[in-house]
Amino acid sequence: MRPKTAHEPSTIALSAIRTERETFATPIAGLRTPLSRIIEILKARSEGMGLRVVRTFNVSLKTVIDWEERLGGLKPVLMLYALLDQFLQLVIVGDELYTLVNKNVPQKLSEGWTIVEMDRASRFLWELHCGQKEQQL
């Protein structure tokens, strides 16, 4: 084995690079078919298309069965989300507050600020950030 010169590119072992995707350890991890295509096919199945008729999408029966088994556990969550999305409305209110430090001073003399985003009905705080007055909001 000869020593590397300065002009040779260095190689990094692929096992040393760790990449995690957003879908890592989720039901859709490792799917090679685009999600929009899977949704189209599963929607046709839920609207009454038989399993064997799904072959018109040029997808094997085993693939569709695997998708249904993999994604079937998500049905209750997705149904609840669809129900809540249809009947509940979130109104999020944002406001800038000036922070009181040691004593009450006018806003122009305040040293810091606080940004608050809150659900109007439940008063649930979505965001709360503080910073120095010089910082951009």
Image: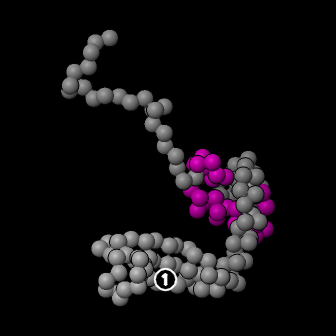
Magenta stretch encompasses residue 50: yes
Numbered disc 1: secondary structure: strand
**3 horizontally vs 86: left or right:** left
Q: Can residue 64 be seen in this view?
A: no
Magenta segment boundaries in residue numbering: 24-51
Q: How many marks?
A: 1
- Residue at 67% from the left image edge and 52% from the top image edge: 27
Q: Can residue 29 be seen in this view?
A: yes
Amino acid type at circle 1 is Gly
- Residue at 72% from the left image edge and 60% from the top image edge: 74
Quadrant in the rendering for residue 131: bottom left
Question: Residue lying furthest front in this view?
Answer: 102
Q: Quadrant of the N terminus?
A: top left
Where's residue 42, x and y in %? 70, 62
Q: Nearer the viewer, residue 58 or 39?
A: 39
Question: Residue lying furthest bottom in this view?
Answer: 106
Mark 1 neighbour class, 10 Å CA radius: few under 14, some 14 to 19, many 20 or more: some
The colour scheme is one colour
**Residue with the mark numbered 1:** 94
Q: Nearer the viewer, residue 18 or 128?
A: 128
Q: Nearer the viewer, residue 14 or 103?
A: 103
**117 horizontally vs 7: left or right:** right
**130 horizontally vs 48: left or right:** left
